[in-house]
């Protein structure tokens, strides 16, 4: 009887340990899924913000008389010079990575490129032509990730002179800019494009990394050490990454996100890599909405200040304009913290200055009543 009791106790203990291990595993997977979602918010925010400037640039350049003239005069040599000068000027004055500009004829053949003075070595791919034809059909500029060379975010606008359609001007922002922006958060992003969409001659010219024999690393500013770590994932880890969207190894947390064009066509994947020691910083599980910096529209400065001042009243150093915008979002202790900070920050403002501050906030709700 005593042996039976010991045996049953052992069985129960083992079952309890197994049960607790399964619970811990499920909780850990839930945390990893939450981290995956928070990184995705940063990725999407960054992509959205990087689509606007090149679109504005494409619209402005397509309206330029110098661009219109080179197309009207069929002067491809001058066209290259004008585009090259524009690209170099932008790089110099904006301190950004290379921006690529090209012009397509009304038949969507390559007319001139900022980076090639001779006959284009690689023509416009068929799939990209379909997207541009849609732009022509609806007579509106387009922007977004798509395939076609060079790789990156593509913004296109029609070149029109006196109601005559002359062609398309396209600006490409390389993935390097997205990678650099997200790297400031302590996240390494690796954009992988299927080799089905990238000519091998381009891969060789740019000396790009390949992963798994079917994907090419689309940015030139890649972190070689982390790319090698990605390539070192064993078959089980790689399968888990692609099936479950994330995997935690002994040294790093990897997350996978579909890389699609504006038509929903999958071109590859964005792989996010963060150090295992840091990955819990991306949980954002605190109850305070503002302390969860990875779930709001935060910059690298926001993240830095959050880490440095997390025990202080986090509203005390905020700019006055943001107090108005955050007022309706705060609750609980945040509301009290904001109230105390607001009294200090706004105490010296006159009635007129307060009215101007509120009215200048385009996102603020309509005001009822008056400031006395």
Image (cartoon, rainbow, N blue to C red):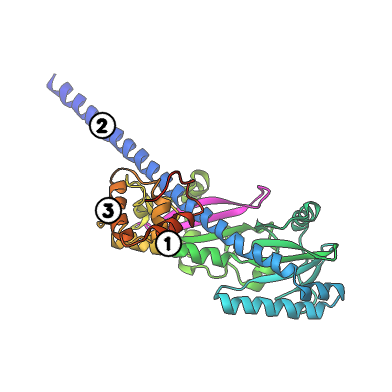
Quick one: 294 or 297, which is closer to the camera? 297
* Rendered image quadrant of residue 61: bottom right
Q: Which residue is mark 2?
A: 16
Quick one: 117 or 307, which is closer to the camera? 307
Percent of width and height locating residue 22:
33, 36
Percent of width and height locating residue 90:
62, 75
Residue at image x 76%, y 60%?
125
* Mark closer to the chain start, 2 or 3: 2
Q: Secondary structure at mark 3?
A: helix
The N terminus appears in which quarter of the rendering? top left
Rendered position, 96 above or below 296: below
Mark 3 neighbour class, 10 Å CA radius: few under 14, some 14 to 19, many 20 or more: some
Q: Which residue is mark 3?
A: 340
Task: Give the spatial CA distance, label 1 vs label 2.
Answer: 40 Å
Q: Is residue 76 left or right of residue 57?
A: right
Whether residue 275 appears in magenta in the rendering, the answer is: yes
**Which residues make up the magenta segment?**
249-276
Q: Which residue is mark 1?
A: 185
Percent of width and height locating residue 291:
34, 52
Q: Secondary structure at mark 2?
A: helix
Quick one: 183 or 223, which is closer to the camera? 183
């Amino acid at each position: 009887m005593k042996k039976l009791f010991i045996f049953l106790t052992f069985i129960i203990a083992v079952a309890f340990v197994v049960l607790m291990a399964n619970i811990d595993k499920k909780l850990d997977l839930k945390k990893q899924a939450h981290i995956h979602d928070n990184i995705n918010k940063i990725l999407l925010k960054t992509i959205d913000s990087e689509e606007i400037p090149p679109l504005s640039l494409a619209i402005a350049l397509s309206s330029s008389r110098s661009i219109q003239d080179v197309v009207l005069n069929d002067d491809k040599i001058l066209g290259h010079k004008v585009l090259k000068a524009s690209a170099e000027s932008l790089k110099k004055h904006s301190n950004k990575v290379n921006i690529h500009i090209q012009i397509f004829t009304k038949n969507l053949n390559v007319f001139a490129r900022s980076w090639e003075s001779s006959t284009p070595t690689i023509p416009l791919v068929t799939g990209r032509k379909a997207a541009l034809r849609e732009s022509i059909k609806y007579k509106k500029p387009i922007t977004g990730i798509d395939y076609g060379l060079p790789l990156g975010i593509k913004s296109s606008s029609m070149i029109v002179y006196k109601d005559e359609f002359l062609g398309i001007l396209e600006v490409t922002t390389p993935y390097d800019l997205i990678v650099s922006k997200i790297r400031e958060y302590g996240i390494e992003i690796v954009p992988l494009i299927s080799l089905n969409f990238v000519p091998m001659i381009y891969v060789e010219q740019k000396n790009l990394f390949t992963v798994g024999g079917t994907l090419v690393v689309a940015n030139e500013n890649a972190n070689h050490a982390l790319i090698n770590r990605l390539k070192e994932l064993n078959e089980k880890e790689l399968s888990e990454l692609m099936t479950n969207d994330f995997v935690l190894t002994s040294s790093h947390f990897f997350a996978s996100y579909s890389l699609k064009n504006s038509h929903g066509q999958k071109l590859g994947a964005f792989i996010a890599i963060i150090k295992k020691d840091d990955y819990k910083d991306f949980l954002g599980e605190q109850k305070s909405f503002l302390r969860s910096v990875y779930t709001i529209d935060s910059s690298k400065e926001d993240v830095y200040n959050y880490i440095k001042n997390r025990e202080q009243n986090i509203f005390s150093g905020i700019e006055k304009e943001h107090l108005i915008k955050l007022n309706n979002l705060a609750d609980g202790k945040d509301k009290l913290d904001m109230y105390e900070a607001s009294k200090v920050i706004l105490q010296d403002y006159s009635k007129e200055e307060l009215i101007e501050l509120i009215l200048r906030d385009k996102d603020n709700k309509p005001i009822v009543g008056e400031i006395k």
